[in-house]
């Protein structure tokens, strides 16, 4: 038995098994990191009184940004305190593998707003296998799967060029992608409103998704627009799935900005039509209205060509700044999802430079009014002074859309939570208990069984996590025990790092990472790698 594993019995639990089946009362025994037995009258050397508590499979975060957090703070309190036992990394087409000595420094700069850029950190990997090995050596508190990021592939093959790849460059992308999938990645992500992924056309993505399909993976796109072009963007992703035969998982599937108020039904009609014709399609969403990203992401695509250093150089040119102002305030930047920027909805959540700390919590409109300047001028100066590291909240969501999308049978849960910055989005600490509290117990949008299935069995099936995501004998003991009457998210926009309430116990691979509501410091997680038998823990 591994260190930290116990032979334990959860006595009198209300079992919600992750399949959507009705809850039932049972005793559940775990041993050797597995669920050993489900029944009544079970005993063992250690008994947890679970009377009145729900025992569910551990929650799976289908869209996480913990790529560095799992290495820097492997106890991972943000996620274990809300019952998460597995995360999917490598999202939005941008992450740290595969890289080379040229692309890594630029990537670190580009992703500083998402993940930080810690001084003295040992970047001792270059490929996907090396990154997953580093996770295993570190020993995080949770399990992790990885998606090969398309934007990172593009950097390796052709830098930040705004053009189609040559045949040789496309072949290089294919080779790196295939190797990443052989190394254990579960699929490919893309970030089509971020540079350089946004420079890819449909044909390039079809070509690469054909490789993903050959290895049994799926495509997880951050599509081109969640604003003016949202439906066209989703339709393009479905067309890529049709033409490539690749499974499709629509990440943070939202309909945002004023142009999409009340239009979730149009997205869901597109989803239903695709499912009816046999497209392998799932989606995830977060149970909040505001979005979160970097401030630099709002720039028009042409401003990012050549990478971060080239972008900063452009922002020093008055003529370029005026061109950007026109795109942001009159035309609608593609980086801002095709809509004219409403600076009152763009709120600074984190900065890289301590000198800019006074901007945190303020909208660009507030800063502009205070300084007697234009919103785009303040926006551009923040980018320059913070060297593109600023993160933001965008207050652009609609409650009716959020609820409609989470009701769909193809829905799964993802936090899309950034863990850095002074005031990050509270979804990083609150997504999963918010589903259970606000959207199940309080408003009845989902039954308890439906909510749990969306966070456990359904994502496990998408990922090919054999032996996870259900409470059944022989399955891995990734489990969460919570009080259904008390569970809720405590994190707020003002205080975003408050742990959830009502989560009593969390187990990863049979070891408690939360016991009696407190983190234990245990780190039993590992990289879960795709093999010819599915995704298996090595």
Image: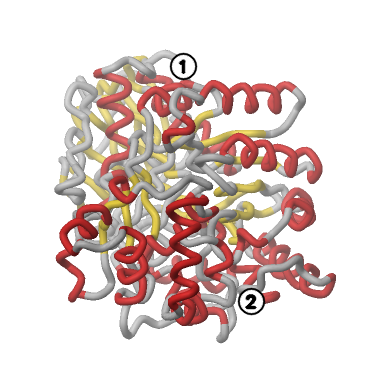
Left or right, residue 248 beside residue 1: right
Query: Which residue is the extreme one toward the right?
Result: 167
Report the residue at 15% width, 65% height from top: 358
Which of the 4 image quarters holds residue 351? bottom left
Q: Nearer the viewer, residue 325 or 34?
A: 325
Measuring from the top left, give residue 510's x and y in whole percent. 36, 46
Q: Specify whether residue 534 is in view.
A: yes
Label 1, residues with CA under 10 Å away: few <14, some 14-19, many ≥20:
few
- Image side of residue 40 versus residue 299, left or right: left
The x, y position of residue 493, in whole percent, is: 20, 45
Instruction: Classify 103 as above or below 525.
Output: below
Relative to 375, is 463 above or below? above
Label drawn at residue 247? none
Alpha-carbon span between mark 2 and mark 1 = 49 Å
Q: Residues within 10 Å of mark 2 (few under 14, many from 20)?
A: some
Residue at (21, 32) in percent of width and height: 488
Taking 501 as reference, is 193 above or below it? below
Q: Residue at x 22, y 36 (%)?
A: 489
Percent from the top left, x then y, of residue 180? 65, 65
Q: Which residue, given by chain and number where applicable, does mark 1 sit on?
A: 21
Give SS at disc 2: loop
Residue located at (34% from left, 63% from top): 379
Using the image as rendered, state which of residue 130 and residue 274 is in the foreground: 274
Circle 2 residue: 159
Point out residue 375 in the picture as x, y percentages from the top left corner: 31, 58
Camera-side residue: 183 or 104? 104
Res. 453 visible in picture:
no
């Amino acid at each position: 038995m591994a260190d930290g594993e116990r032979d334990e019995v959860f006595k009198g639990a209300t079992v919600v098994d992750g399949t959507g089946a009705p809850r039932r009362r049972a005793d559940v025994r775990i041993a050797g990191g597995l669920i050993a037995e489900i029944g009544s009258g079970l005993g063992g050397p250690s008994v947890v009184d679970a009377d009145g508590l729900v025992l569910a499979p551990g929650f799976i975060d289908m869209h996480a940004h913990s790529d560095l957090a799992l290495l820097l703070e492997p106890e991972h309190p943000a996620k274990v305190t809300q019952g998460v036992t597995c995360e999917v990394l490598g999202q939005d087409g941008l992450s740290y593998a595969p890289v080379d000595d040229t692309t890594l420094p630029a990537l670190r700069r580009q992703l500083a707003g998402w993940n930080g850029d810690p001084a003295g950190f040992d970047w001792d990997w270059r490929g996907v296998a090396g990154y997953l090995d580093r996770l295993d050596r570190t020993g995080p508190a949770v399990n992790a799967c990885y998606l090969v990021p398309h934007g990172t592939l593009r950097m390796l093959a052709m830098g930040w060029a705004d053009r189609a790849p040559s045949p040789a460059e496309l072949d290089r992308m294919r080779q790196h992608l295939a190797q990443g999938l052989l190394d254990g990645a579960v699929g490919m992500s893309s970030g089509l409103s971020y540079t350089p992924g946004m420079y890819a056309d449909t044909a390039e993505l079809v070509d690469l998704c054909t490789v993903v399909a050959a290895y049994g993976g799926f495509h997880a796109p951050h599509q081109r627009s969640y604003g003016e072009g949202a439906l066209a963007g989703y339709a393009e992703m479905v067309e890529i799935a049709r033409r490539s035969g690749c499974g499709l998982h629509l990440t943070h599937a939202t309909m945002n900005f004023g142009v999409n108020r009340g239009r979730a039904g149009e997205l869901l009609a597109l989803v239903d039509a695709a499912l009816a014709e046999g497209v392998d399609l799932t989606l995830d969403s977060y149970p909040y209205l505001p979005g979160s990203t970097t401030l630099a992401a709002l720039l028009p695509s042409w401003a990012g060509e050549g990478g971060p250093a080239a972008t900063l150089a452009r922002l020093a040119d008055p003529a370029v700044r005026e061109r950007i102002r026109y795109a942001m305030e009159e035309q609608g930047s593609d980086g801002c999802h095709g809509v004219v920027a409403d600076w009152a909805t763009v709120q600074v959540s984190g900065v890289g430079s301590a000198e800019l700390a006074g901007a945190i919590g303020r909208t660009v409109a507030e800063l502009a009014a205070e300084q007697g300047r234009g919103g785009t001028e303040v926006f551009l100066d923040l980018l320059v002074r913070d060297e593109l590291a600023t993160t933001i909240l965008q207050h652009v969501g609609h409650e009716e859309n959020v609820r409609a999308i989470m009701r769909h049978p193809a829905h799964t849960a993802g936090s899309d939570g950034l863990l850095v910055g002074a005031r990050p989005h509270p979804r990083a600490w609150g997504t999963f208990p918010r589903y259970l509290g606000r959207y199940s117990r309080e408003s009845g949008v989902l039954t308890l069984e439906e909510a749990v299935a969306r966070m456990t069995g359904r994502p496990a099936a998408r990922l090919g996590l054999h032996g996870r995501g259900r409470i059944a004998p022989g399955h891995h003991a990734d489990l969460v025990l919570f009080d259904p009457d008390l569970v809720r998210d405590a994190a707020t926009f003002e205080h975003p790092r408050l742990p959830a309430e009502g989560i009593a116990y969390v187990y990863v691979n049979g070891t408690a990472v939360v016991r009696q509501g407190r983190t234990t410091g245990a780190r039993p997680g590992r990289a879960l790698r795709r093999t010819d038998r599915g995704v298996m823990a090595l």
